[in-house]
Amino acid sequence: MSETAAVEERVEEQTDAYAEGSLDDPAGLEAADPAAPELPLQTPRPEAPTADVLKGRIKVADEVVEKVAALAALEIPGVADLGGDLERAFESVRDRIGVGTKRATQGVQARIQDQRVSVDVTIVIVYGHVVMDVATEVKVNVARSVSRMLGMRVVEVNVTVDDVRLPGQDSPTRDAPAA
């Protein structure tokens, strides 16, 4: 049974339970008390529309997937930064001249097609961490986070390790002199 069908079934059960009164009176205490005044029967509430009946569509922009993937990649210990050399150099120059802020999706590209997602992530590793272990953790965490938060099937996560951050070397944006 798909996850959507399971959720719809639970909503239907709760709606039925509410209509029967078991949610308002879970122990059936009102029915057991003969001295309680009889309340007029309430008209049952209309059922909530299910996803297959309700019209409309949901569209998630690629940038949303990219932001979720970027945050998921940065959660992994050993990931120093995102993006390739050119992207990081561009961000450094932009930061030094004071134009804009760092893009949250730097180093991440996502493609959505028929509720399936492919993600490419470019990372910088902190020296001393095992590159393959960190890249594998990034791959798994990105897939898990995108799938959980967006409800889409992740079919591919490609991780490119572009650089290694040496000890004591901060990101270029932190080395910039204060203006």
Image: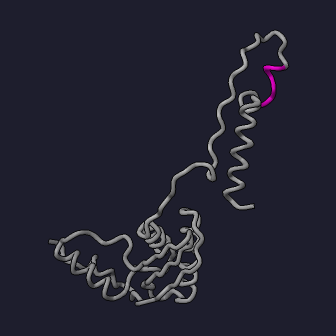
Q: With respect to residue 133, does 76 lie above or below? A: above
Residue 80 part of the magenta segment:
no
Q: Please say which color scheme the image uses.
A: one colour
Instruction: Work out which quarter of the rendered image holds the C terminus and state it.
Output: bottom left
| Residue 133 x, y percent position in the rendering | 57, 85
Figure label count: 0
Instruction: Work out which quarter of the rendered image holds the N terminus and state it.
Output: bottom right
Q: With respect to residue 91, does 3 lie above or below? A: above
| Residue 81 x, y percent position in the rendering | 40, 79
At x 37% / y 86%, what residue is drawn?
84
Left or right relative to 41: residue 62 = left
Which one is in front, 141 or 19? 19
Which one is in front, 118 or 101? 118
Q: With respect to residue 80, does 29 lie above or below? A: above
At x 80% / y 22%, what residue is drawn?
29
At x 68% / y 24%, what residue is drawn?
43
Region in magenta: 26-31
Left or right relative to 70: residue 85 = left
| Residue 3 x, y percent position in the rendering | 68, 59
At x 76% / y 12%, what residue is drawn?
38
| Residue 148 x, y percent position in the rendering | 58, 64
